Amino acid sequence: MSDFIVRQPCLEREGAFAGALCSAEATGLYGVDRPGVAWDWMKQTGQAPCGVDWVRPLVADAWMRCVEDHALPTGLDFPPRQRQSDGFVPEIDAPSRAASGAVASHLSAMIYDLGSLLDDADVTLLLADAAGRVIHLLDSGRRIWAGGMQMARIGADWREASLGANGVGTAALLREPVAFAGKEHFNAALHRCATAGCPISGPDGGIVAIVGVICDRPDAARLLLGFLKVARRLLEASLFERMSCDGFLLRLRCGDEAGGGPLSAGRLFIAQNGRVCGADRDALDILGAGDAAAILGKDAAATIGVDLAALNAASDAADIVTLVARGGGGRAVAAEVHRTAKRRSAPTVSSGASPAGEGAPRHPANAFDGAWSDSVLDSALRKATGLQERNISILITGESGVGKDHLVRRLHASGPRKDRPLVAINCAAIPRELIESELFGYEGGSFTGARAKGKAGKFVEADKGILFLDEIGDMALDLQATLLRVLDSSEVTPIGSSKPIRVDVRVVAATNRSLQEMVQKGAFRRDLYYRLNGVQLRLPSLRERPDRLRLLAHLFRLEQEALGVTETMCFEDDVWRVFDRHPWPGNIREARNVLRSSIAVARGKLIAIDDLPVDFLQELNADCPGAAEACQSASRDAQCAQQGDETSFDLADWEARAVRFALASSNGNIAKAARNLGITRATLYHKMARFGLRSDKRIISKR
Ligand SMILES: Nc1ncnc2c1ncn2[C@@H]1O[C@H](COP(=O)(O)OP(=O)(O)OP(=O)(O)O)[C@@H](O)[C@H]1O
C-alpha cells in the first residue's frame, strides 16, 4: 500500500510543494480509507500531512504534535515511552502520585459501577490521571489485545507524548473529549482499536482524571465518545455531591419562572466570601460560562449578578434569587438558595486547574497522599451502608477469601450500628444439633448438657446490632424454616421457653456457594433466599480484579508492617508478572499468605521468584514461562534437597528459610512453628541458635 502511494504522483504536489500530500478530493479517489492512506504516506515520508482533507483536522494536528513536538517515530508499532530502568512497582505507584487518593478512589468506585453497564460490550473502561497514566482499568483488556498487554494495564502511560495520538492521552492534552478510530491513531499498535477519552472536572473546574474506553472495533469510536460524555456527567455529578462549603448552594432552574416549570438543573456553590467556589457542568451551561474559569473563583455579584445580601435574604425567606447568565444577552436564571455548612470530615475533591503533562504545577489535592483505597471494597461498603440504613437484607457472595467477612467488619465499624454488637456465626462450623441453641438460646436445664442458667442466643446478643450469618449455604434445611420465621417476626423463642423475645437485628449473610443453584436443586429454601437476598453484593475474585497489582502492593505494605519489617522491601519484575498471571484461587487470603511467606523467606531487600512458595508457583498456568521455569527450578531444588545433593542446593540455606518462614507465619510462637515444621521445640531452639534467629518478630527484619 505504501509503495503504491509513493508511486502515485496524484497524491503528491509538484514543484515547490513536492513531497507534500495533496487534497483527497483532488485525487478523485473515493471510497478509500483516507486516514489509512494518510498514515501510510506519513510512514513513507516521515512527515505529518498538513492542511489536507485525508484526516480530520483534530487528527492532523495530533499527528503534527507527535512528529514535531514529541519527536515520535512515524509508521511504527512502538511501546509507550518509559524509562527502561522502571521496574514494576514504580509503574504501579507512579500514577497514584498524580491523582488525589480520595478523588481517584471515589472515581475508581464509580468506574466499577459504570463497568457493569458494559458487561457484554467487550470494551475496556479505564480511568487515567489528569496527564493520561492509567490508574484503574476494568474488564477485557486482555481479550482485546493479546499483544497490547503493556498498554492495557494499570500504570501504563497513555500520554500523547508517550504513545502517540490516542483517545486518552490526547483528551488529557487538549482537555476535551476526543475519539480516535483505527488508523487515526499515530501508533500502529492501536490501529485495530477505537479509543476515546473524556476529561473529568472537579467542582472547582480543574481536571481530576480522564475516563477512557478502548474497544477492538475501530468503527465504534463515536459511540464510545457518546458513552463517555454520559459517564462524565455521572462522574462529575457524583464529585459535586461530595463537595461541601460554608456558604450557599444554588439550584438553578432552566427556564424563567413562568415557563420553566418544575425542571431544575445545575448547581453551584457560593462561599461566604461571595465568590463562586463550585459549579457542575449543567450550571456552567445554563449560565453560559463556556470556560469554568469565567465564573469559578470569581465574585458572584460581578459575574452572575447576585450578592451575599440577596443570598442571605432568599435563604431566610425560602425564596428564589435571579442570576444573570453571561451568555445569551444577560438572560435571567432563577435559583433556589440553601445555606450550607462545610462537612468537616469531608474529603476534599478540589482538583486545582492543573494542566496535563509532566512538570505541570499541581494543586496539593493532586499530590499522592500515600493512602490506598480498595475501590471494590469502598463501592461495596457504600452500597451496604445505604442498604443497612434502609433495613434491607444484604447477601454477600464471592469465592472463598475474597473478603466477605472483612467487608462485614468494615461495614459494622463504619455504619450506624458501630457502637452496637457485631455477632458472627459460621453456619458451617457449628454442629447441626447445636445451631438452634446457638442462634436462639435456651432456658436453663432445657436439654441434657445445657447450662443451668440458660444461654442467650446469637440473635439476642446481636440485638440493636448486626448478625452476620457466614456460610449460610451450609445451613440445614429444617433450620432454614425456623430462621425465616425469626427474620419475618423479629422474635426469637429460646429452646425450652414459650416466651418470645423481640429483637432488632440487621442480618447480613454471606456464602461462597450459589444459593440460586441450591434453590433450584431444593437444597436451599426459596423463601429464605428471597428474604436474605434483599440486595446481593458480589465481591470479585482476585484474578477478575483489574487493580489486583495495586491491591497486592497495598497488602505487601500491610504484611511488612505486621511483621515489623523496618527496611523497605520490593519484588523483582518477574515476580509481579507472576502475580499478574496467577489465578489466585485462594484470593486475598492466599495473597496475604504468599506475601507474608515471601517476606519471611527472602534474604535481601529484593524478593525473587524462588522466594515464592512452591505450591503457589505450581498453581500457575503453564503459559507463564518465567514462572513455570521458576516452579521447575524450585521443585528441582526441593528434590535435590531431599536427595541431599548439596552441590546444586544449599541445604542449610533451605532449612534456615523454612525455619524463618515457620516462625514468621506463627508470629513467633515456638510451639506452633515447631508443630508446623514437624520437629520438637528443643530441635527448633537448636536450629534457631544455629541460624542466629530470635523468637520475636525481629527474626524477619533484614540482615
Ligand atoms: N480489602 C482487604 N484488605 C486487606 N485485607 C483483606 C481485604 N479483604 C480481605 N482481606 C483479608 O483476607 C483474608 C480473607 O478475607 P475474608 O475472611 O474476609 O474472606 P471471605 O471471603 O470471608 O472468605 P471465606 O469465604 O473463606 O470465609 C482475611 O485475612 C482478611 O483480613
Image (cartoon, helix red, strand yellow):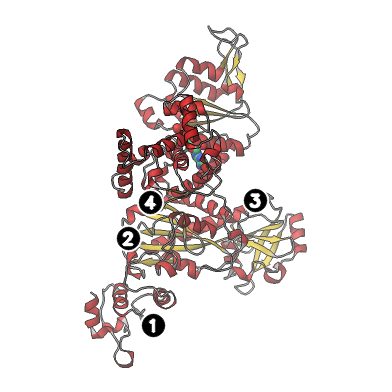
- Please identify, in this view, whether the residue under mark 4 or under mark 1 is nearer the observer: 4
Give the amino acid type for the residue marked by disc 1 in the picture.
Gly
Label 4 and label 2: CA atoms lie apart by 32 Å
Identified by mark 4, the residue type is Asp
In the image, residue 475 above or below residue 244: above
Q: Name which of mark 4 and mark 1 comes first in the sequence.
A: 1
Residue carrying label 4: 574
In three-dimensional space, the C-alpha distance between marks 4 and 1, rounded to whole angstroms, equals 47 Å
Is tag 3's residue or tag 4's residue first in the polypeptide sequence?
3
Between marks 3 and 4, how big is the CA–CA gap? Answer: 40 Å
Rendered residue at 48%/52% (across/down): 111
Badge 2 crowding class, 10 Å Cα cut-off, few under 14, some 14 to 19, many 20 or more, is some
Against 52, residue 420 (above or below) is above
Residue placed under numbered mark 1 in the picture: 51
The numbered mark at residue 669 is none
Q: Is residue 539 visible?
A: no
> Distance from label 1 to label 3 (Cα)?
50 Å
Give the residue displayed 59% in from the left and 35% down from the top: 412
On residue 217, the disc is 2
The residue indicated by pointer 3 is 346
